[in-house]
Image (tube, rainbow, N blue to C red):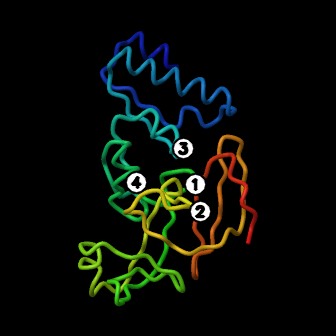
Amino acid sequence: AIGRAIVRQPQVFLFDEPLSNLDAKLRNEMRSEIKRLHQRLGATIVYVTHDQVEAMTLADRIAVLQAGRVMQLDTPRNIYNRPAAEFVAGFTGAPPMNLVDGRLVGGSDGDRFDLGGASLALPAAQAAAARGTARLRLGVRPENLRLQRQHADDQPLDGTVVLLEPLGAETLVTLRCGGCELMARMAASFMLPPG
């Protein structure tokens, strides 16, 4: 079907979940082939998919839709690093962004984000923006959590290892921090046992 369309030299290609019925290996091969094709033809491709890997790897720009409304229209990099809505933040990434409810508490060392027993110091600008807000949510990507302080500006947070999920190239670590659980992406060699 793609070949027949190319022969006509259209200005726009419309793809509606073209890889959904393929097995994983063929899906990866075809995704790469469609990317090469797009680069070679230079034509506009409108590509509909529920697979975020397809969207992130193929797109120059992504429109994230929820219930028929555009939540964000942006580059893949901005969709991932600067989500404009909570839905976008929770939808992109595998595993997705940790989203945690909490409240602002003041202390002798400044304002903190309380996660129900564990807390994070907030920079002054974020604390000022959070004051007077009824509902606060912390969003942090699993790869941005470390289990040891590496930089002076890293914010410490007490937690307990609950679960390890070795995936070969990496290990996903579930941590209990106060009243919530956070997922961290660690090196494959990470072996700290639960508890």
Which of the 4 quarters of the picture holds residue 135?
bottom left
* Mark closer to the observer (2, 1): 2
Residue at 24%, 72% in the rendered image: 125
Q: Which mark is residue 95?
A: 1
Which of the 4 quarters of the picture holds residue 192?
bottom right
**Between residues 192 and 68, which one lies in front from this camera angle?**
192
* Mark closer to the observer (3, 1): 1
Q: Earlier in the sequence, mark 2 or mark 4?
A: 4
Q: Residues within 10 Å of mark 4 (few under 14, many from 20)?
A: some
**Between residues 174 and 106, which one lies in front from this camera angle?**
106
Question: Mark 2 near mark 1, Cβ–Cβ under 8 Å?
Answer: yes
Q: Earlier in the sequence, mark 3 or mark 1?
A: 3
The residue at which mark 2 appears reads as: 183
Question: Mark 3 near mark 2, Cβ–Cβ under 8 Å?
Answer: no
Q: Earlier in the sequence, mark 4 or mark 1?
A: 4
The residue at which mark 4 appears reads as: 65
Q: Which mark is residue 186?
A: none
Position of 153 with respect to 27 (left or right) is left
* Mark closer to the observer (2, 4): 2
The kind of residue on which mark 1 rests is: Pro
Question: Mark 4 near mark 3, Cβ–Cβ under 8 Å?
Answer: no
The residue at which mark 3 appears reads as: 51
Q: Earlier in the sequence, mark 2 or mark 1?
A: 1
Q: Which x, y percent locates residue 44?
A: 32, 27
Q: Which x, y percent locates residue 55?
A: 46, 40
Residue at 34%, 54% in the rendered image: 82
Residue at 74%, 67% in the rendered image: 194
The kind of residue on which mark 3 rests is: Asp
Visible residue check, residue 181: yes
